[in-house]
Amino acid sequence: MPSTLEREEIKVKRLFERLETVEEVAEKIEYREPNEAASLRGVVQEALEEAGPIRVSVAAALLHLSDRTVRTWIDEGLLTVVASRPLRLDPARLHQVLHLVRDLREAGQKRDLLDAVWYRLQDSALLDRNDLQRSLAEMRQGDLQPALSKAEEEASTTNQA
C-alpha cells in the first residue's frame, strides 16, 4: 500500500497530466476558437487555484530534482511558498515551472536550470505586459512610431495639458 506521500505525489501528477491535456486542446483550437481556448485556460487556472498546497518532496519528484535543489529554487524566488510549517508550495507556480523545466530539458538543457527557468519566467512576465502587447500589435499592423525619450515624453504630455 502506498504511503501518504506517494499517494499525494500520484494525485498531483494525475492532476497536472489532466490539466496539460486541457492546455493542449486549448492550444490546438486557439486560432479557430479563441474564446473557447480562453475558457479552457480558465478551467486550468481554477483547478490550480483549488488544488491544495504541495509538499517540497512532491515538487522535487515532479521536477526530477532533489529536495535541496527545490529549496534553493524557493530561496531564489522561482517557486512560491504558500505555507511555511510544514513548507508547502503554490500549485500554479509549480505547474508553470514544471512546464518550463520540461521544455528546457527537451531542448537539451540539463545544467543551469535555475538560471534558464528564471530567464524564461522574466521573459514571460514581460510578454504579459499590456503595453508591450499593444506595441507588438501596432508593429504587426505597420503602425510604427519612433520611441520617445523620457524628456520628449514629458514635454509631449506637458504640451497636451
Image: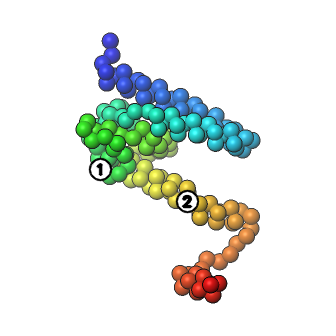
Q: Which residue is mark 2?
A: 129
Mark 2 vs mark 1: in front:
2
Determine whether the residue tagged by mark 2 lies in a helix, strand or loop: loop
Examine the rendered structure and indicate whether residue 5 appears above or below residue 71: above
Q: Residues within 10 Å of mark 1 (few under 14, many from 20)?
A: few
Instruction: Name which residue lies at 68% across and 38% down.
Output: 36
Per the model, the C-alpha gap separating discs 2 and 1 is: 25 Å
Residue 128 is situated, as x and y percent measured from the top left of the image, at 55, 56
Q: Which residue is mark 1?
A: 75
Residue 21 is situated, as x and y percent measured from the top left of the image, at 57, 31
Residue 24 is situated, as x and y percent measured from the top left of the image, at 60, 35
Closer to the camera in the image, 50 or 70: 50
Residue pushed farthest top? 1
Closer to the camera in the image, 125 or 52: 52
Determine whether the residue tagged by mark 1 lies in a helix, strand or loop: helix
Which amino acid type is shown beneath numbered disc 1? Asp
Which amino acid type is shown beneath numbered disc 2? Arg
**Which quadrant of the structure image shows residue 52?**
top left
Q: Quadrant of the C terminus?
A: bottom right
Instruction: Name which residue lies at 41% across and 23% down.
Output: 10
Residue 27 is situated, as x and y percent measured from the top left of the image, at 64, 40
Residue 140: tell me if it is visible: yes
As drawn, is 52 to the left or to the right of 44?
left
Q: Quadrant of the N terminus?
A: top left
Q: How is the model colour-coded?
A: rainbow
Instruction: Name which residue lies at 48% across and 28% down.
Output: 15
As drawn, is 62 to the left or to the right of 127?
left
